Structure formats: structure tokens, C-alpha cells
Amino acid sequence: MKFTLSWLKDHLKTKATVDEIATKLSAIGLEVEGVEDPGKALGAFTVARVVEAKQHPNADRLRVTQVEIGKGQPPVEVVCGAPNCREGMLAVFAPLGTFIPGSGITLEKKPVRGIVSNGMLCSLSELKLTGDGDGIIDVPVEHSDRIGQRYIDVLGLSDPVFEVKLTPNRPDCTGVRGIARDLAAAGLGTLKHEPRITGVEGAKDCPIEIKLAFDKDSADACPVFAGRYVKGVQNGPSPDWLQNRLKAIGLRPINALVDVTNYISFDLGRPLHVYDADKIKGAVVARLGRANEKFVGLDGKEHVIDESMCVIADQSGPLGLGGIMGGEASGSTDSTTNVLIESAWFDPLRTASTGRKAGLVTDARYRFERGVDPQTVMPGLDLATQMILKLCGGTPSKSRVAGGVPDKARSIGFDFARVEKLTGVKLPEGEIKAIFEALGFTITGKGSKLSVGVPSWRPDIHGAADLVEEVIRIAGLDRVTATPLPRLHGVTGPVLTERQKRTRRARRTLAARGMVEAVTWSFLPRHQAEAFGGGSEELELANPISTDLASMRPSLLPGLLAAVERNRNRGMADVALFELGQAYRGDTESDQFIAAAGVRAGTARTTGIGRNWDGKADLANEFDAKADALAVIAALGLDPAKAQITRDCPAWFHPGRSGTLRLGPKAVLALFGELHPDALKALDVAAPVVAFEIFLEALPPEKKKSRARPQLAAADLLPLKRDFAFVLDRKVAAGEVVKAASGADKALIQSVSVFDVFDGGALAAEGKKSVAIEVTLQPVSATLTDKEIEAISAKIVADVKKATGGEIRG
Amino acid sequence: MADTAADPSAIDLSALESELLNDVAKAMDLGALDAVRVSALGKKGRISELMAKLGAMPADQRKAFGQAVNNVKAAVSEALDQKKATLEVAALAARLANEHSDITLPVRVGPEAQGRIHPVSQVLDECIEIFADMGFKVAEGPDIESDDYNFTKLNIPAEHPARQEHDTFYLKTKPGSNAAPLVLRTHTSPVQIRTMLGQKPPIRIIAPGRVYRCDSDQTHTPMFHQIEGLVIDETTHMGHLKWVLEEMCKAFFEVDTVTMRFRASHFPFTEPSMEIDIDKGALGKPGEWLEIGGCGMVHPNVLRNCGLDPETYQGFAFGMGLDRMAMLKYGIPDLRPFFAGDLKWLRHYGFSILDQPTLGGGLSS
């Protein structure tokens, strides 16, 4: 919503400055997005007369002029190069020191071909104004009495323009009058009385019939339609003051008839329409649209109508969309002589829905969908008639009204104490009353049993809380004093849920392993979702911003992989990224899950990134990913040894170099391994990349346990270690060897580690490999005898053989 | 010296002593010195042999001779010890002189120095610390929301102009379904609804999370983060709201004072509604106002929609942009790189694992 200062002053008597007005508007909820004050940029440019213009002695194209810049002041010498510069003309003068907006130069005193120019005669482009004419501005001679005055005043462009970002609840402020009312209530002046309109009601009946044709269910679409016929108007350009106001707020003047309706729309927030009455066939009817109806709007485009839209039609079909846009065929032109003025009321919801379907954003829709004051139907019609008679002449008819103004009057039970209860601010009752009255509310009753009548222009006010808002925003939100919120506990307890705690721990664990946290989009291209087990129809956006962001992600990995590739393209090949966030198996709440996922590419291993003199720079491999996954699982309180490892990874993992960590057949804790080359190809990511994805909610819930630790069972007896090497079939998992050895004596065997795996040389040819383990025995009550150790060793060998077929190596 | 075997007392002990001391002096390394020790004091050493023969001597000679041999043994032992100490010092010095590494060779910095926490996560942890102290728990809700929770229950009916301001992403409707399409939540406010439906007042929660708007330009991304606050009881009013926000800003920006102002505004789910501005003084630029979020008293219709009687219960809600807060506090100029996964950006603006925000130790280090 835009308006000018002088327009505001039509409704508000005030001495406040532009800045004061802007500050107050923002404070009371009418946020000022900008104030454009042409006086600031163009205030130095004045009207001047060229008294004398002589040829420059040293330059063919230049003239030396004597310029009268004000009464009683000696003329100044100015050098001018414009071909239209001539003696006696009125021009626009800029003194030395003026900043010229069009050229970005500040005028300095310096000679032009040997003669000092004491200023400049300016062109329109130098003032950044648009208009016709080459050379310097040729001010019309009738302004010769305004020499020395500001040129923008002569143009009528000096008015500061306010732009207010209206919230959708304030239809009253879509008119300047509503804004003036708010400012007056807030103490920035007095609201002027609206002049009574007389002499607009004609003697004859309106010759055009107006009908409402709705059934019961849709009667609220347009409950009232008022019209008046004006005969014998002379249309044409509207006067300068009106054109300037419209231009100042960014509207293009069309002709007097249209300009009047636009003016009233912005002045009172009351949209109107003017039909060329001679182009209407039969009665004007407000009704619902019919299938296959179309009309060509004032925008020159054809619009399709459906049965939910409210149209204004005549015998020939729709003339326009009610409350949104009139039609080209019935619009007024310069040759229009007889008009029908429309002032109606259209239902906000239907207007919004129609506008959205038709894709039309107009000043009328903006107002009707917010809720135009129904009480302005007749005053708006009268004001439009009055202005048209004044600007275009003609003879008015009687007004004709179909339907009746909807009665939206209501009052709200209120208690003054409510203000303090909600705001914490104790305001005197007198002040509260004064605010209500200044805003047009009426108050009846006393004390805690008040009844507050809501003015017709405030459809947004429905309850006591709304009234409190009116009071406090006008009284001043700066009067709200900070009041400590009472503490619930002496010392604050933990506030995180188990899932939130897991997320936090997983995040810091992965960062501690040298990985960098990324946050990637929750949506991705559908083919990427499909490559990672997603891409179902229910997770597709209906209106994505682009096809690259169209499917909700089934996994965090594609987003991370895309980031890997972007980093590689910027010369960063060693990448270890992770993300903690949500992914989606379906569209229900329980389908959303939290995962901790990570990718490693290049040499980004836990031990360090890149080449270093102290060791090889190996590529990150599936065991780095496994270590990451197990580290997170351990950090979340689960003994990693309890997780089973199976080989059944989903298709986006390498079939031979990946694994699933699970607790039983259903609970999948994590996936890890090298990614499948096909999956990477689908994302245009170069192989190899290793990855893991941990499902934080799949871990068993935290057990309530005592804070005290169990007693330390530290044996005094020295542990002893024994090595065994087994030759087994290449396909047998080392984990099976460890499991069998560990189980050989659960009391004595403390740990089993694999310290060597060899599958080269002669073993390779036989399809065998050697796995060497170190078994740590921890005696419990007495030192082990050689015999006992031999017995355990023999059992380990036997058990491993039984479980894996592995033979002890000699 | 064949006769000495027969008569030990005939031996010239002082010559023996000189000879052995001379051998000690000549030994140039620990091995040679040990050979001297063995030749003198070993089982078959010359002094040991003399000692062994003492028993066979007549008693009158034994004492004096024994004394004399012992003196020789003591002198030789001491010389051996001293020489051994000297040789050990020399040997260590020689070894150390040989042991030399180029300590300018670079070392690996270690994973804990490489890892980074994303600024949004860090700032969220900071906010949780602050609000935890004021008794707020952390609540969550799903990204894919019903139209009802995202709009209708929040007092934003269908076709309301406020809906247009939300630039909503819709999910595809299932064929044949008449239900309103699901939406990607446009704000964290549906968590208010979930919380009020799920528990009775008093309520104090914050709800952080991802939100979505179909909008993308210099300063907007289709996904960003918000943090929502909700307090519901029977007495909480706008003064409390102002206090909570002021305290929060002071703690978050780690300054002693923050100048804050409310500007009247409109949100369908609060009444009265305000925008929150802070003076940029907290960021070192006093005199300029900066909008940091919206807030208000929870709208009676919202309370009613959640089964709470607005005549009994009241409270406030507020919402702020987490990404924006990170940008303000840590001087991050642009929003878009937050979601680009660019290592250079993440290493520069990200945080160390050791930067664990705590109220006691400071939110940032």
C-alpha cells in the first residue's frame, strides 16, 4: 500500500514530520517498507530563465548564457551545450555543489573551454525523470512567475511517498483514510471529518437493471450490488493533481473515469468499477460462473471461468470477475459518453479462491479478499458519482441497489482488566476508552461488563484478545515492561529427549573422528531418491522449486555424495562429510526417521588426510566406514560386540564390501561399506566412496541404571597371550574364527584379536587364507599351569576347526 | 709366580693392586672393563683366588693377610665402579650424539582438529542451553505435516490471505483422495499444536527444526531452520515474553545489555502479535534496528483448537530463524552456503568438537 504525505493530510491534520509518521506507522503495525522523498534528491533544482544566450567564443556547440535564478538576484553565467537552449526560455537550474542523480556527478566550479560555468541547465535524464524532449528541460512559459522555486513543486512531484507492508488483517488500511485513523488514534494528529456528499442522486431511475442471481448456498458471494447511471460524460485525461497522485504511488493514469475508481480504491479502500453503459446488453447480473464461459479482461487476456467464481454478466455473457477485474469489452474509453458505476460487496473467501484460480492479482482482489467495509457501498458510489460529475460532467440517475448491505455488526464482551492480564501493562480505563473511540469502536456498559461495538471496517476483530491488541499497539508496545518468568526449578534439569541426546552424541563423535558436518536439502531429484530406495509417489512434491528438489529423501547419502562431487570439482578430493538429520520412508509421522550418515572419499581416513612422510596415503575403505559406524554405536551406549554383522546390504552398497550391523533379524542399526559403482553413477559421482548410515532410533532404549559403577574386577594375576594361525577356506569370515576362539573358555579368555590375514602366495592358488589370532587369557584364581594352558589351546584349535574347518598352521 | 700358589703370603700385594688398577685405567669400554672385573673379582679372579686360599693359612698369618687382600679388593672394586660410571656417561653421550631426528618434519594434526560442527547445530546447542536454564524442554515434530496442523489449527483457514504469504510446498495427493494434500511444514508452529494436544499446561517448550518455503533467491532458500518457543499457563503475559526474549538475546549474543523493541504486527496464531527488533548494539553497531523474529500471545482460537479454555489458559509463542541467528552472531554473510556442503566454508565457519556450549563455561570460546 502506497500513499503520499499530502494525500494523508487530506484525512489527517498533523504537524508530524515524515520520519515521525514513518516511525509511528511501523510501531503500530503498519510496517513502513520505504519512504521516497523526491524533495531530498531533487530539492536543489529550481526554475530559471535564460536571459541571454551567446555563442561560446571557443566552441561551436556551446553557448554562454546569463540565467535569472530568482527575483532580485543578479544573473549567473552558465555554459550550456544543449541545442534547444535559447534566450527567453524557462529552464531548470542546478547551482554549484548540486549532486546530479542522472550522471552521478557533483557540480564543481571549473572552466568549460575557458569560461567558468556557475551551475548547470539540466535535462530530464539528468534529473532521472522520464518524459519527452531532447536537450534541456523546456519549462512551460506559464510558470514564469515561479522562477527560483523548486522544479519538483512545479511538477507536483514533491510529495513524499510512503510504502506500507500491510498485514492481511487490515483491509481498512488499504485506504489512506484507515491509515490516517490509526495515526490519529496513536496521537499523531486529528482525523478530519469526511465531507458530506450531496447533489449526486439524480431524478430519473437508473435505466439499466441490476440483478443478483444466486441460490441460497452462494448468496453470500455478492449480497449487494449498487449502481448509478451517468449520462453524457466527457471522458479524457484526468487533471494533473489526480494523475500526479496516481503516478506517485506507481499507478498509470488511464482516463478520468478509470482514474476516479482507482483513486477511491486507494483513498477509502473501496474498489469500484465503471462500465461503458452503451456496451451493456440488457440487465447487469451478478451470478456464479458457468462451465466454458470466458471473458477478456482489462489486462487484454482471456480468462476461463468456472462454476465457483462470481461473475458480473449481461445478456451476452460475463463482463468481468466480481471483485477482481472488469472486462475489456465493457470498459470505458475516451469515447465513452454514458456510464454505469458499480459499487458492490464480494465475499472475501470466494474472491481469494477465484483470484488464485484465475492467477489474477489486482488492487480490487487485494481489498475484497481482505474484506472491504460493507458500509462503503453507498458512500463509495456517491463519491465516485461526485468526482465523475466534477471531472467529466453528465447527468446522474437515481441509484439502483440489488440486495442489501450485509449486516456484519457485532459487539464483544470485554473487561478492562483483560488488558493487564494479557499485556502486564496497567492502563487507565480512560485511556483504553479513548483508544477504542479513536479507532471507531463504541463502548457501552461499565466495569467488567463492557460491550465493545466493532466498526464495520474491522472484520478482523472477533474477541477480547483482538481488542487488547488494539489497545496495546496504540497505547505503545514500549510500555510493556520485561517481567521475569518464574523459575520452575532451583537448578534446571535435563531437557532433551533420548533421541535428541543420541543426535548430539553422534554428532560430536563423528566430528571427533575428523568428519565435517554438512546440512543438505531434505529433497532431491527423483532418480537419486530411486537409486537409494526411495522415489515413491507419496513423497513427491506437487510444486517443487525445480526437478532437482522434487522428492523427499529416503537417505542422507545422496545429498552428501553430491557435496563430495562438488568439493572434488573445486579441487578438494579428500572428503569426510557427515550429516545428522531426517529422512523419509513414507509420508506419515512414523515414517520419518533420524539417521547419522557419513561419506569418506579420497584419503580422508581417521588417521589423517592426505599424504604424509610417516606412512602411506591409502584411500578410505569399507573398514573406515565400519569403524565410524561402530564408534557411534559405542558412543550411544551399546557394546559394539553385541551387534551382529551380516552381508545383506541394500543395492546401493558394493555387494562384496559392505555390511549391515543389526540386533537380531529386524533391528538394523547401521549400514556400512563401499558404495555400489552403479549408485554412484546415478548421481554422477566418481567411485570409490565409502559410506555409513546409522539409524539412531533402531538402538534399544536407554536402560535406567544406577549412577554408581559396578565394582572393578581387577585380577592381580598376570594375563598371558597365545598366538594361533589357522588356514581356512577363503570365504570363511574371520569373525567366525574369533567367535569360536572366544567361546572356547568364556571364563578365562578375555579377548581375541586378529593380527594378521594373508591370502597370497601358495594359499591363493588353493583358495585358502591364513588368519592369525592373539588370545589373551586372564587367570582368575590361580596362575595357570602349563598343562592347563595346553588344554585351553587344544580346545581353541578344536573349536575353531569345528566351526570353520580351519587347520592350525604348523 | 708359581711360589705364590704355595705361599700366598709371599705375593706382592701392592704390585698386584697396581697392576689391576692399571688394567682398570686402560679399559676403554664397558666390555673391557667387565673383563678386568672378571680377571680380578670373578670366581677365578686373582683376588678371589687369594681369598679362597685364606682358609688354608695358619691362623697367625690369616688375619693380617686377609686384611691386606681385602684392602686390595676394596681399592680395585672402587676403581671398577668409578670407571664404570665414567664409561656409562660416555657411552650414553656417544649414543645421544648419534640419535638425531629432523623435528621440523610436519606431523598429522589428528582427527579431533579436522572435524567440524555445522554452525546451525552449534547455534541450536547454544539456544538449548539458554532455554533449558529458563525451564524450556525441547519438542519436535515431523517435516511432512497435515494442512490441519500447519494451518487450520493455527487459525489460518483455507483461502486466508495469510496462507499466500507462506509459499507452501505441497505433497502430491494420492489418486482418488479428497483429503487436503500434506504440506512440508512452513514453520515450526505445528509443534505448538502437537505439544498442546499432547500435554496439559503448564507448558514451556522450544521447538527447533527444518522448515520449507517455495522461495529461492539471494536471501531465501527453500529449506531453512526455525526455533519456536511456547509458554502456556494461567498467568504468563507479554511482559514475561519480553523478558524471555531479552534474556535470551543477552545470553545468545553474550553481551550485558540488549535493547529490544516490539512492533505491532499480525500472525493468525497470536493476538496481540509483534515483530521483535533488537538494537544492533549487541552486534557492535548501535543505532540500527534489526528484526529477529515474530511473537505474540497465543490466539484464543489456537488454544480452543487444542482443547484449552482461553478463559483459563494463556501464554506466548515466538519464532526466530536459527540460520539467521548464526549469521548474525558469527558474521556469516550469506545463507545459501549453509546447505552446500562446501568443505572450505564448513571448515571456516564450523566449530570444533571442543566448543561445547555451556552456560558455565561460556556459549562460545
Image: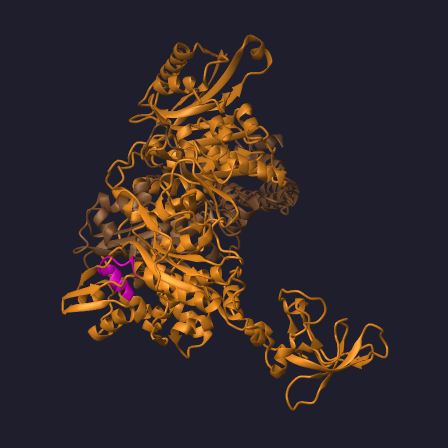
Chain colours: A orange, B brown
Q: Residue at x 41, y 54 (%)?
A: A364
Residue A273 point in image, percent of width and height: 42, 56
Residue A588 point in image, percent of width and height: 33, 33
| In the image, residue B177 above or below residue A318 | above
Q: Nearer the viewer, residue A610 or B324?
A: B324
Quarter of the figure with residue A464: bottom left
Furthest residue toward bottom: A72
- Residue A58 located left or right of residue A469: right
| In the image, residue A209 above or below residue A13 | above
- Residue A147 located left or right of residue A172: right
User: Total marks drawn?
Assistant: 0
Q: Residue at x 35, y 19 (%)?
A: A743
Residue A328 point in image, percent of width and height: 50, 49
Quarter of the figure with residue A492: bottom left
Residue A209 highlighted magenta (yes or no): no
* Quarter the N terminus of chain A occupies: bottom left
Q: Which residues are magenta?
A: A457-470
Quarter of the figure with residue B278: bottom left
Q: Does residue B152 appear in the picture of this structure?
A: yes
| In the image, residue A78 above or below residue A221 | below
- Residue A170 located left or right of residue A680: left
